[in-house]
Amino acid sequence: MNFEQKLRKKQYDQIWQQYCGFLDLTLPEFMEIQNRLMMEQLQLYADCELGRRIMKGKKPTSVDEFRKVVPLTNYEDYADILLPKMDAALPSKPVLWIETTWEGAKKPLKVAPYTESMLKSHKINTIACMILATSNKKGHFTLRGGENFLNGMAPLPYLTGLVPHLILSELWVNFMPPIKEAMAMSFGQRNKVGFKMGLQKGVDLFFGLSSVIAKISDTFTLGGSGEKFNIFKVSPKMSYRLLKAWINSKQNKVPIMPKDIWTLKGLICAGTDTASLKKKLENYWGVKPLEIFGGTEPTCIATETWNKDGLVFFPDVCFYEFIPKSELEKNIEDDSYVPNTYLLDELEAGNEYELVISSFKGGAFARYRMGDIFKCLSLSKEEDGIGLPHFAYVDRDPRVIDLAGFTRISEGTISEALMLSKLDITEWFAVKDFDEFNRAFLQLYVEVGSEGMRGAMTKDIIKEHLSIYFRYVDTDYNDLKRLLGIEPLVISIIPAGTIRQFSNTFGRRLRKMNPSHFDVIEVLKIANGGNGKGVF
Amino acid sequence: MPFSELFFWAVPIVALTSYCILMLCLSLSKKDKFIRIFMLVLAALILWTMSSLFMAIELYPGVLFWDRVMVVGMIAVPYLLYYFISVFTNSLNPLSMVLWGVLTAAAFILNLLGLVVIDASVITTTVTENGKQYNSIEYYYVLGKMAIPMYVFTSILISSIILKARHSVREGKTTYGRVGPIIAGISLLFIGSLLNVIHAVGKYPVDILLCFINAILIMYAIYKHRMLELRLLVTKGIVYSLFAVLITCVYVYTVFFVEKQLGNSYQNITPYFITLSALLVAVVFQPLYRVTCILVDKMFYKAEYSQRQALKNFSVSISNKLDLQDMASELIEAVQLAIHAREIILMLKHEDKGHYYVFSTSSQIFMPDFEVSFDNPIVKWLKDNINPSLSRDELYSHPFFKSMWEKEKKVISDLDIEVIIPIKSRSDLIGMLMLTRKNNSTAYTLDDLDLLTYLGTSSAVAFDNARLFSRAQSEALTDSLTKLFNHRYFHKALSEQTKIIGSAELSLLMLDLDLFKLYNDLYGHSEGDKALQVVAAIMTRLVGQKGIVCRYGGEEFAILLPYYDSKRAYDMAENIRLEIQRTFFNTTDVTQRFLTASIGVCTYPHAAVNAEELLKRVDLAMYTAKNNGKNQTVIYTPNFSSSGNLFNDDDPVTIEPAYTATIYALTAAIDAKDHYTFGHSQRVAEYATVLAGALGLDKSHLDIVRQAALLHDVGKIGIPENILAKTGRLTVEEYAIVKKHVELSITIIKHLPSMNHVIPAVIGHHERWDGRGYPRGLRGENIPLLARCLAVTDAFDALTSNRPYKASLSVISALNEIESHAGTQFDPAIAHLFIKLVREGAIDVEMNQKINQGHFSA
């Protein structure tokens, strides 16, 4: 019996157990699943070229031994096998390859193999997310099938493009726009058409990047998308709702909010800036958004629960290890330092960790550094009856600046843009910051060289130049302004020699990407010369 | 009474009785939604048949009224059947139900408005046949203009029921067995409805007759295919009583009817005849009552009946059994009888291998090859007392099973396992029963699971005992060290095989490990045992299921290969021999190179006529292999002659004098190569022999130490002369080469038949008391005693001789050196004894040096 048949038979308890039952696991039970599936993966690794290489020809007989034998890895360790899609060298035969950009298109497209078994568990977990999005109490959910689903995510071959296909194999929902049509549309077009359909038919579920949902909501609230639609195609129910919202808006002199028109069953969002946008989204849409976390390499690995107040990891997707922030800092300072990792049952609440994953079910990645930082909010939630740790997504690894989930800017990206721009910039460092609307932007502090000082090197000129080259080296950068209306780059000029002076004063070099908050204060103090007049 | 009259009366009575019995059964049963809906269908059928009967007896208010009521029944039956089939096959479509409902309601209204039947009556005419008068009864009716559309509508509805049922069967929602009779019954109703339009047929209650057949088919579907699970809520006694009352009523009515008929026709017949006829009717009704009781039993208690039988048989038989295979068969049979699963798999625990394996199945042919490891969540789930069983749904949906491996899931899925039942004794999960779908494709009920759990639990203790018994039995026939069959089993198997093999070939391999005593002496018995286990594993792996591998005794193994001719047996023997050689030669430890095997092969019936002869001749072949230089396979042929003496190569007594000359020749060779050690071996031999004598060793040991001393440096033959003669200090590499002379000595000695006993002394003469020696780094008394003697005497002679790299020391200085290294390099007791012997003159050093020099100079 598939999900829809169970829904028809009103087997809600069985559905909850099948899809959300993992929330009833105790931590030892969770770890047992982790260990056992890792042992399966070790067997699969042992029989393939990639596995033999990663495990250095050894055959670890326990998970502990695996953690000792296999070093932490990143995509470069797999690129020679994955980029040419060498199926035969992998632990299991993939049925699908999912793609994503690699360092803002500076490198070729990253691809990750998906086995049949991975897809099965991904499907179950995707449906679990949908159930939880429509739930506000344990065991209760309002998903019933046939809902109007506004899908604001990228299509295949991106991971989010799998969602409609996986859901439709279990449950009929009305995707807006329909999948086939959506495939032929650009990202912006899809959202516009979806919204138009939503105005005509209503919206029950909405899945999108937090930053995109926020942008659409802003546009909507500020007077609509500007798109015209045929009022005769609007359903009577929606006509009534639109009219009611319009009257309410006129009477109270308040803008029309999405929640005045739609009563969502569930709002699912993802993306690096979700934490800062969640309140805003709830205010716009009238429902608490359910945050989920996933990636091309591991699939969807965490979801919030019915209370929407913390991510819980799925037990059967990947083996999770965590690098404490302190270890990560050491590693950032010294590349050769091998940070220690901890398991889910060894974490401390309140600490931040970088996530390391090892694929299950024949996936390719072993001890793979995701570059995502999570904060462990609590080790369990007794009030909800959940015995598993809850997390909040913090941000990317400080060495990468992620803007609205659209682009990931690394030290290499900035260096390349600076080099191509031929601007006389001698020193720089970059920090991720947020504007008054909680939108992320890249704050670039630069020191101008003597040549530059002689010429016209204002903030605007530098910004203009760099923006052009950022768009050149990072194709995703362009979408930020185009789709979200974000001004992603802010330039601050600091006096020449500031960064050197910082190094001399503190005896260590200043990190170029996201230096610590305290270091930025110290640098700015030096730049200000103590009077705050040094930064332009 | 003519047939037409009997037909007119009897058909509605019998049909009505049948439906009433069915209705009674259902109303007394535990009701689920299927039963409730089916009761509605039955109610409509009862209305149909009852009104037909009331028409026949022209009950008030009249025939036309009852005819219209009958039509109401006719209209209601298809609609309610459609509803039942939709719910039963889980394909209920509310829209269709509403549509058909509206049309049915319209048909009702048309009927009540009198547009279907305009007029109806029963015409009784008197007919004279063979001079006797009978009443002939016929329906007379006039159909209205809406009758045809009503029949068409009913026909379409019935057709759609048939199509729906067929579709559901194709989709696998139900089986033909369960809905087939219903489809047939509905088809008959369909025909019956159509026949009503034709007046010539419709004047008789043909539709009611078909209605009765439909009732029979429904009963059959319930009885045979468990279309509805009927469970009585009242005791059997009450049910029987109710049926007795019902049948008695019918009986009384029949008797009175007969009396009335006879009374009308034959008034002169005496009451005795009436009594006789009553008796005759009773004779007919008594079996009818019995049949009804049996039917009730089968319909309501069929499952329980089979289950009770299964339990009864199982409890009796299991208590008398200790044989695992028999018990497994009994359990599977009991489960099969009670549940009717398509396939039953019994898995038992394999303590040593850490998994559960397929021990037996309900089918002799189907024996899936898979295991369930102890850490499989299924095992943990079943071990947990809270879970008495595991269903397929739980397996696929419970988060507990997220840790299952893909291949584990695939096995369960491929085998189509529906339920897994533990066989548990206290907290120990001894085994598990895996059941596939039931034969009738119905789901497992809670009662089924209760019964299975009971069977599992009740058999657990017996299984545990049987397992222990089987283990004891197996241990009695198994060698505990190698886990191969033992000597006792070998003889049993040999005797059995020669009996059952007939004129086909049976080859016997006898394998003996070469120099195994030496291996034990060198490494100790613990290492020897490990080597035997390795060899056993090699043989087991290579022979597999093709033969029987036994440990014959000590380091001798016998392998029985049924249906193997000499050639194939020889190939097998060679495979084993080469694998043993490869395994033990492959190691870096030089001293393990000794383990090889000599194998004899003999084949029945070509080379031996019976088991005894086969054994005797294979033994002969094996000894021949040993005497021909070991590490080889020899086949016994009818014109076979042993090429060597069958002596024990490990017996030192046999060595003299055959190899004395060889020993001296080798000693001379090394002396010739290494001029500086000229006579060294001879002198060491003399010293060591005296020393061993002083230690109280017997003559055989004195001989061994002497021979060992003579041969201890024989490996130097293989060391380059420039290294042996080097005057300066040896480099690390050169020293490493020199150290190899021990290894080389062993290689040479092992090719001297019957000289193996000197190897422990030779190989250990460079070991040190403190464990820092070579080649094995043995320490203290782990160094063989004779090796410790050689160590002291060898060092002493080296110190007192001129060497390329040093001048000789005086005897006193040499003794001081020995003394200073006692407890570190040398065994302190032996070193002090040696010093004492030299000082006391028991060992005449100068004389020895002279004698040896003179001897070799000559």
Image (cartoon, grey):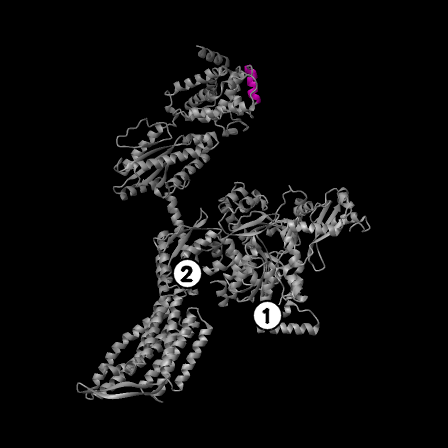
What's the amino acid at mark 2?
Leu
Circle 2 SS class: helix
Residue drawn at the location 66% of the way across and 60% of the way down = A277
Spot occupied by residue A531 in the image (x, y as percentages of width and height): 82, 50
Q: Is residue B816 magenta?
A: yes
Residue denoted by label 1: A230
How far across and how far down the image is residue A90, in percent? 50, 46
Q: Which mark is residue B443?
A: none
What is the chief secondary structure element of the magenta stretch? helix
Query: Considering depth in this image, is B800 or B624 the residue closer to the camera?
Result: B624
Pick the front one: B545 or B149: B149
Classify A410 as above or below A4: above
Subunit under mark 2: B
Residue B29 position within the rendered picture, expressed as x and y whole percent measured from the top left: 40, 73
Left of A280 or right of it: where is B374?
A: left
* Element type at mark 1: loop
A210 or A51: nearer the viewer: A210
Q: Does residue B546 lie above or below B247 as drawn?
A: above
Q: Nearer the viewer, residue B500 or A492?
A: A492
Q: Which mark is residue B452?
A: 2
The quadrant of the picture occupied by the C terminus of chain B is top left
Q: In the rendered structure, which segment of residues is drawn in magenta?
A: B809-820
Can residue A18 be found in the magenta stretch? Answer: no
- Circle 2 or circle 1, nearest the eye: 1
